[in-house]
Image (tube, rainbow, N blue to C red):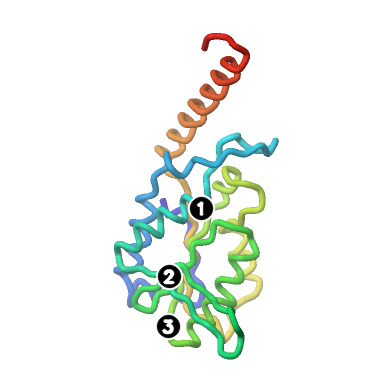
Amino acid sequence: IIKDIYSHKGGLEFIKKNRPAELKDIYNAVKNIDINKALSKRTHEKTKNSLLFSPIDMNNQLKKFLSKKKWNPRSISFDNVPNAFREIDGLKNKVGLEIQFGKYAFMAYDIFSKMPIFHKRGLINCGIELVLSHNMIKDFSTGVGSFNQIVLDMKERGVADLDLPTLVIGIECSEDDWSLVKDLRKKFKSNKNIKKVNLKGNKP
């Protein structure tokens, strides 16, 4: 579900008024995430559950859904700089989309550096940054950024002339999703215990 929204430089108002269909695409893509597939990362971090969400899988699910809605990644190159390029996760009708389930610093880079570059090239006139709500990060590997972190920076920094209307969206599991997560982890733990028993030569 869409848990959190932050409007930077009038981003929510601009996108609702000028690109409502594109915003609907994003909402539907989030709703379409398959928790069974997303909860697939095994970890040995002592402070985490052994089964976590996979940022790669969630990213791929969103991109696959949105590609059917004619959202496509877009790259730009730089003159006189070999092999230098910047790529945005999705672009449709001058709306730039970044899906950021990675390290905290990348969120600020997307909004304050990458989006203005694409805006300067005339490719986008507004941006959407899709991130995790604060409640989700405990279910990812250590170091993943959250909605609260980037919004704090944006509020403290303020608005600059180079900024474009941007909407930051924080996503989170619904109550039904969290119930499913709990069940999937129980099954995963049970299967691990069965395998350990079998390795000792005992019957499960």
First in sequence: mark 2 or mark 3? 2
Q: Element at badge 2?
A: strand
Disc 2: CA contacts within 10 A as few (<14), some (14-19) or many (>=20): some
Q: Report whether 96 appears left or right of 112.
A: left
Marking on residue 23: none
Q: Callout 1, which amino acid?
A: Ile
Q: Write the residue at 62% across / 13% down.
A: 200
First in sequence: mark 2 or mark 1? 1
Give the CA separation, mark 2 to mark 3: 12 Å
Q: Element at badge 3?
A: loop
Expressed as whole percent of the image width and height from the top left, the position of residue 194 reads 54, 18
**Of residues 197 and 95, which is closer to you in this image?**
197
What is the residue that sits farthest to the top in this orientation? 203
Q: Callout 2, which amino acid?
A: Pro
Q: Relative to 116, does residue 73 appear above or below in the rendering?
A: above
Q: Write the residue at 60% across / 44% down.
A: 138
Expressed as whole percent of the image width and height from the top left, the position of residue 146 reads 58, 56
Expressed as whole percent of the image width and height from the top left, the position of residue 116 reads 53, 81
Q: Element at badge 1?
A: helix
Q: Relative to 175, does residue 158 appear above or below in the rendering?
A: below
Marking on residue 56: 1
Residue position for label 3:
123
Q: Write the residue at 55% across / 73% down.
A: 111
Give the CA separation, mark 3 to mark 1: 26 Å
Disc 3: CA contacts within 10 A as few (<14), some (14-19) or many (>=20): some
Of badges 3 and 1, the one in the foreground is 1
Residue position for label 2:
73
Quarter of the view holding residue 71: bottom left
Q: Callout 3, which amino acid?
A: Leu
